[in-house]
Amino acid sequence: MRIFGILRLKSTKHSDSSRDQRTNIGERGMAEDRNGRDMPADALPPGGCDCHVHVFEPARFPLAADRTYTPGLASLPMLEAHLAALGLERVVLVQPSVHGTDNSCLLDALERLDGRGRAVAVIDPETTPDAEVKALREAGVSALRVNLESRGETRADFARDAFTRTAARAADHGLAVQIYATMPLLSHLADLIAASAAPTILDHFAGAKAAAGLEQPGFADLLHLLAGGKVWVKLSGAYRASSVPGHTDLDPIARTLITARPDRLVWASDWPHTGGGKERAERGPFALEPFRDIDDAGALRQLRTWCGDAATFHAILCANAARLFAFPF
């Protein structure tokens, strides 16, 4: 039986048995609420959902010692201010790489959202017991994440093994699989995704790069998977796909995806907008990484433009998220 989330969240507490192996950085740095400066031009429809955000409360939930970056504070109250500024009612929390397989921070925020949220967790497909995966699902987790990009993983054999093992665990518990990877790497997973019993969600325009255009390796595979209803794609983090101001070079990719399967797309801000790239490599994993200054209201207006009509905009912002993550219609 496939269950994408639940309608009422239950409390699930996890002990941090490895707390002595974690590094507590305290509450240095913070995500700012900038969205009030630039509200969406038109009121949003009811049930709008931001399908990809992270919460960081390092003073309460220490970060993993083997992390690749150190974020500042992005607390649940800050997230709620972000949602309120945009006029969004629902949200999907995504486990960041800096917490590894310790989903404690995610579950704490999910419980406090009191039905407004769902979540995407991370497990070790080899060692996480079934009882824990069941508890995650009962708490409101809808998918298990395979994060290849944050650690720069490009090996096709590693990616195929990670997907296969995680997808099997997800299918056993009625969950989806969410993948963050480059588009060329995703092309090596296309056959596995097509055969998977678990639905697959692809982060951040499925790893597409605006500069590479519609002919980039893997894009044809993505369209084939979309046409067959095998994947969902998050139109999220446009700044990760484009370096052009306003991200107008993403227009052909976004419009092609929307034309192909508007019923298989969801929108997300990727708040609080962690960094990356060469700056992260130069900074090192333990120096505080500033969040990016992103106009999320502008991203919503851009989505409205890409959609072209109110029905498509409502589907991507509201209805599709409700179906995928089991929010009430």
Image: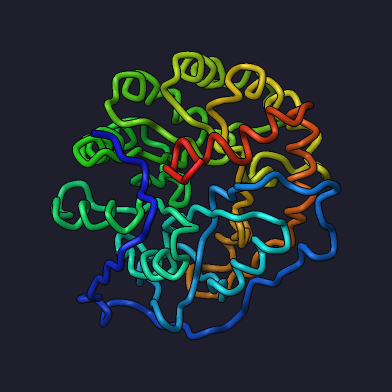
Q: Quadrant of residue 204?
A: top right
Q: What residue is drawn where x is 70% and y is 72%?
A: 32
Q: What residue is drawn where x is 47% and y is 39%?
A: 181
In this picture, residue 69 sits left or right of residue 262: left
Q: Is residue 254 above or below residue 134?
A: above
Q: Is residue 305 above or below residue 68?
A: above
Q: How many marks?
A: 0
In this picture, residue 89 sits left or right of residue 173: right
> Considering depth in this image, is 50 or 291 the residue closer to the camera?
50
Q: Quadrant of residue 261?
A: top right
In this picture, residue 20 sits left or right of residue 77: left
Q: What residue is drawn where x is 75% and y is 43%?
A: 243
| x and y, in percent, of residue 278 in the image | 61, 55
> Considering depth in this image, is 277 or 6 the residue closer to the camera?
6
**Residue 100 seen in the figure:** yes
Q: Quadrant of residue 163?
A: top left
Q: What residue is drawn where x is 22% and y is 57%?
A: 135
Q: Quadrant of the N terminus?
A: top left
| x and y, in percent, of residue 174 in the image | 26, 38
- Colour mapping used in the image: rainbow
**Residue 207 seen in the figure:** no
Q: Is residue 264 above or below residue 26?
A: above
| x and y, in percent, of residue 276 in the image | 59, 56
| x and y, in percent, of residue 120 in the image | 40, 51
